[in-house]
Image (tube, coloured by chain):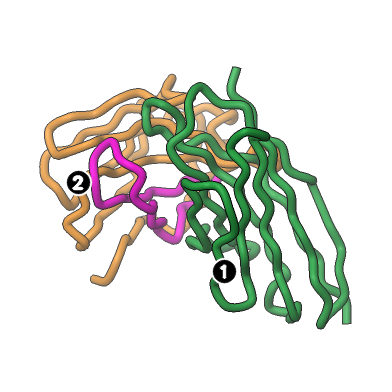
Chain colours: A orange, B green
Amino acid sequence: IAGITQAPTSQILAAGRRMTLRCTQDMRHNAMYWYRQDLGLGLRLIHYSNTAGTTGKGEVPDGYSVSRANTDDFPLTLASAVPSQTSVYFCASSGGAGDTDTQYFGPGTRLTVL
Amino acid sequence: GQNIDQPTEMTATEGAIVQINCTYQTSGFNGLFWYQQHAGEAPTFLSYNVLDGLEEKGRFSSFLSRSKGYSYLLLKELQMKDSASYLCAVTDSNYQLIWGAGTKLIIKP
């Protein structure tokens, strides 16, 4: 692995189903982030983690949960998917918690909720 | 509220120069980033400004004026591969990145 990986690449999901998007980084970055990107709205922060064992809410956290059991992994879970969660989801990481380090992005997961 | 403004779309000619502007109103300021995002791909880092002035990196330069809440990204000698969206983002007082909606740059031959 080099950088950040996300899985799956794309997914079509029935409304009401539970779904976990996976994100793994091998850069030993402290901070990790989940964004959603919708046309015309730019990137919006869902949840973040400044270091393993801690998480925080971003701009649009409702309907999503995260965990950070170790440095490398930061899964995002949709407990009961709704059509408004149709979006492209990007995971990112940065080297320092709470500082201005550059964020590096994974390739994204395209999620469609029907 | 916090706000980042950039033009929605711009068109330029191959070989020319284009300037993409970004204005911001945020609670505090700890730096400004420019990212490039090709269609269907992830954003990739282009530049970072925290002090006033111009940062040059090859064909790309980025300028910041903190007193005016203003930045621009200057792309010289445009190539077709520069067709992409350019995202402006500001780190606020809580060190959270606030993102603009992006400027779609179309390069014509």
In the rendered image, the quadrant that contains the N terminus of chain B is top right
Region rendered in magenta? A87-109
Circle 2 sits in a helix, a strand or a loop, which is it? loop
The residue pinned by badge 2 equals A30
In the rendered image, the quadrant that contains the C terminus of chain B is bottom right
Amino acid of disc 1: Glu
B60 shown above or below A19: below
The image quadrant of residue B104 is bottom right
Amino acid of disc 2: Asn
The residue pinned by badge 1 equals B56
In the image, taking residue A11 as reference, residue A56 lies left or right, namely left
Residue drawn 67% across and 41% down?
B70
- In depth, the one of B57 and A33 nearer the eye is B57
Query: Are there few (<14), some (14-19), or many (20+) residues within 10 Å of tag 2?
Result: some
A113 shown above or below B15: above
Q: Residue B22 location in percent, x, y? A: 69, 44
Residue drawn 48% across and 32% down?
B29
- In depth, the one of B7 and A43 nearer the eye is B7
In the image, taking residue A23 as reference, residue B54 lies left or right, namely right
Residue A93 makes an appearance in the image = yes
